[in-house]
Image (cartoon, rainbow, N blue to C red):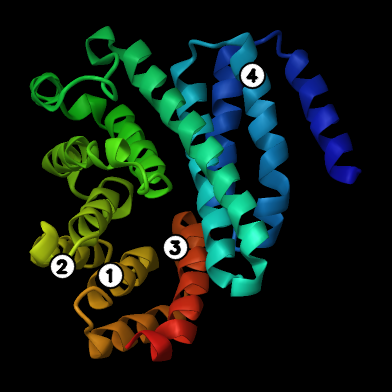
């Protein structure tokens, strides 16, 4: 009830701004910052749905606001990621609940991808329908991008990768993996440190999904994970957790797995902008540690 009263008061104050788009855009960016700086995943999980609906309301009023669309896509992906962490911590007996959460994840990721795609289209109509065109045309379109486009490009890439992660049972979705890789390669070309070397982290995962015998490129994935860790001075714990989950497990490298998990669980957090991500990484690390004995 207290949260509802707060949101109503916030809406009232925003109405006094006369629909000022700049103020709403600033609010949405600050909201993203506040979420990413929070170390209480349960509070974030409980509060985020209300803010997602709040941003939906803003977008209803300003459907072509690029910043609002990007902010909404980021928050939906963050919430879907939180839900994914909860699934990892559930017991096998919670199968019904897991399926419900997976369905919710798919809805969130689908909506986030559509909003990120719309945002980059509004930003430059040469980049419309990027998620629908063939690979050859997609590759040509990406050549038209430059460093100034990196925020919209990375937002589309992360939303697309998150969407693919919850649709791996769909071969049509899996067929779009090369396009996502191209996006991340382009981001790395422009600025490999962008969003705490996030593109390297995604490339590590995308290249380590399958073993080499089935077309995967785990050696390349390893290089990207190590680049993400080096570029962030080891402060991006999610890079280490994903390195353990996707590469060390794929290669059955128990020693590397144990080393990475230990580093994550003993890390003393000093990076406020990475607080939520690192908190999630610790939770994933605990789940990986608990299941390691059965895996290796």
Mark nearer the viewer, 4 or 3: 4
Residue 179, can we see it? Answer: yes
Percent x, y of residue 59: 59, 17
- Earlier residue among tags 4 and 2: 4
The secondary structure type at the circle numbered 3 is loop
Upstream in sequence: badge 1 or badge 3: 1
Residue tagged 4: 58
Q: Looking at the image, do the residues carrying marks 4 and 2 touch, with CB atoms under 8 Å apart?
A: no
**Which residue position is annotated with label 2?**
222
Pointer 1 with pointer 2, Cβ within 8 A: yes
Q: Quadrant of residue 258?
A: bottom left
Q: CA distance from mark 3 to mark 2?
A: 24 Å
Name the front one of labels 1 and 3. 1
Separation of disc 1 and disc 3 at Cα?
A: 20 Å
Res. 243 mark: 1
Contact check, label 3 and label 2, Cβ < 8 Å: no
Q: Which mark is residue 131?
A: none
Discs 3/2, front: 2
Does label 4 or label 1 sit earlier along the sequence? 4
Residue at left offset 19%, top offset 39%? 187
User: Tag count in the figure?
Assistant: 4
Disc 4, SS: helix
Of mark 1 and mark 2, the one earlier in the sequence is 2
Q: CA distance from mark 4 to mark 1?
A: 38 Å
How crowded pointer 1 is (Cα within 10 Å; few <14, some 14-19, many 20+) is rated as many
Residue labelled with disc 3: 271
* Label 4 close to label 3 by CB (< 8 Å): no
Residue at 8% of width from left, 24% of height from top? 136
């Amino acid at each position: 009830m207290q949260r509802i009263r707060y949101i109503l008061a916030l809406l009232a104050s925003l109405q006094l701004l006369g629909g000022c788009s700049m103020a709403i855009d600033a609010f949405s960016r600050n909201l993203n910052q506040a979420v990413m700086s929070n170390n209480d995943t349960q509070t974030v999980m409980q509060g985020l749905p209300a803010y997602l609906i709040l941003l939906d309301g803003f977008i209803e009023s300003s459907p072509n606001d690029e910043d609002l669309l990007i902010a909404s896509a980021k928050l939906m992906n963050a919430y879907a990621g939180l839900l994914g962490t909860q699934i990892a911590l559930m017991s096998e007996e919670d199968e019904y609940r897991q399926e419900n959460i997976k369905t919710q994840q798919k809805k969130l990721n689908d909506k986030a991808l559509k909003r990120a795609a719309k945002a980059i289209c509004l930003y430059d109509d040469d980049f419309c329908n990027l998620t629908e065109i063939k690979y050859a045309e997609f590759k040509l379109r990406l050549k038209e991008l430059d460093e100034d486009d990196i925020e919209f490009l990375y937002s589309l890439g992360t939303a697309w990768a998150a969407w693919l992660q919850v649709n791996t049972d769909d071969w049509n979705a899996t067929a779009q993996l090369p396009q996502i890789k191209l996006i991340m390669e382009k981001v790395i070309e422009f600025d490999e440190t962008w969003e705490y070397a996030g593109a390297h982290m995604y490339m590590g995962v995308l290249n380590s999904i399958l073993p080499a015998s089935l077309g995967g490129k785990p050696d390349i994935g390893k290089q990207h994970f190590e680049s993400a860790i080096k570029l962030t001075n080891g402060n991006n714990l999610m890079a280490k957790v994903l390195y353990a989950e996707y590469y060390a497990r794929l290669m059955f490298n128990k020693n590397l797995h144990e080393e990475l998990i230990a580093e994550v669980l003993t890390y003393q957090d000093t990076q406020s902008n990475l607080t939520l991500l690192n908190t999630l990484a610790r939770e994933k690390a605990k789940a990986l540690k608990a299941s390691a004995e059965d895996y290796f």
